[in-house]
Amino acid sequence: MKIGVYLPDISPQSGGAFTFVETVLSGLATLKSDYEYHVFFYGTNKHLKSLSGENLFFHSLGKSGLLRFLQKIYYFYFAPIFQYLVFNINAKLKIKLHYPYSSKLDKACQKQGAHLMWFPTPQYEKVEGPYILTIWDLEHRAQPYFPEVSANGEWDGREKHFKSAIQRASYVVTGTNVGREEISQFYGVMKDRIKILPHPTPEFALKTYSQFNLPLIGGQ
C-alpha cells in the first residue's frame, strides 16, 4: 500500500510545527513496514529531505511561492464554479468532460499511485481520494473573542479552511479527548471517524528527560 504524506514548507524557525513534522518523518524513516510512504512537498524542505529510509520517498511539487498562492486561489474559489458548470453541461448534453479541479498535489498522488493521503499538520490541499487530516487545535471556535484567531479576517479564513477539510476527511486525528469533543461538536463529525493519537515527543526531549533517571508519565 502506498501512503501519501503532505509536507508543508516549514523550517526550524517554525518551532513546534517543524519539530512535530521532523519527529513524524524520522519515525517513518526507521519504520519497518511493507507500506511505501511518499512525501509530497513545496519549496526545498532541505532540513527534512535529508531523512532517508527504505520505504520513504520524496516528491517536489515546485518552489514558486507566487505560483502556489495563485493555485490556492484557483482551487479554492474558481475551480468549484467550473466544476458546477461542467456538471450541468455533462447532464444536459450527455457528454463527459473532466472537472478542472485537480490540484498539483492531487495529480502527483495519482501519478505515484497513492491509496491514501495523510496530512500530518492542519495544512491541507484538496485531493479527490481518501485522506486523513490532523488537527492540532480549533481555538478560533473555542476562543473566538481572541484577536489572534479572529481579527483581520483570521476567523473566516480558518473556518473556511477547517470546515472544508474536516468534513470530507475519511478520518480526523487529534491528540486529546478534548480535541475529539471539539471536532465532533463544532463540525458534526461522528466520533468513530475521530482518532486520538497523542502528539509524538521529540527524541531530544526524551533524551534530556532520561538524563534525570525519572520515570515517564504513566510509568512507561
Image (cartoon, rainbow, N blue to C red):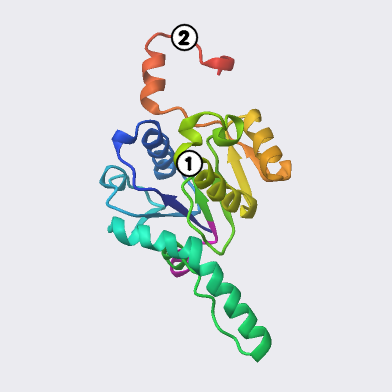
State whether residue 7 appears in this view: yes
Q: Which disc, if any, is residue 214?
A: 2
Mark 2 touching mark 1, by CB under 8 A? no
- The amino acid beneath tag 2 is Leu
**Mark 2 or 1, closer to the camera:** 1
Residue 47: % across, % down: 27, 42
Placement of 44 over or under 134, stated as above or below: below
Q: Residues within 10 Å of mark 1 (few under 14, many from 20)?
A: few
Specify the segment rendered in magenta. 109-116
Residue in view at x 39 percent, y 44 percent:
29
Placement of 101 over or under 118, stated as above or below: below
Q: Residues within 10 Å of mark 2 (few under 14, many from 20)?
A: few
- How far apart marks 2 and 1 lie (CA) works out to 42 Å
Task: Give SS at disc 1.
Answer: helix
In screen coordinates, is 9 left or right of 165?
Answer: left
Residue in view at x 73 percent, y 45 percent:
190
Quarter of the rendering containing residue 178: top right
Given residues 191 and 149, the one toward you in this image is 149
- The amino acid beneath tag 1 is Glu
State whether residue 60 appears in this view: no
In screen coordinates, is 9 left or right of 154?
Answer: left
Residue 4: % across, % down: 47, 56
Q: Which disc, if any, is residue 154?
A: 1
Task: Give SS at disc 2.
Answer: loop
In screen coordinates, is 122 left or right of 30?
Answer: right
Given residues 64 and 217, the one toward you in this image is 64
- Name the residue furthest front: 152
Given residues 35 and 90, the one toward you in this image is 90
Quarter of the rendering containing residue 15: top left
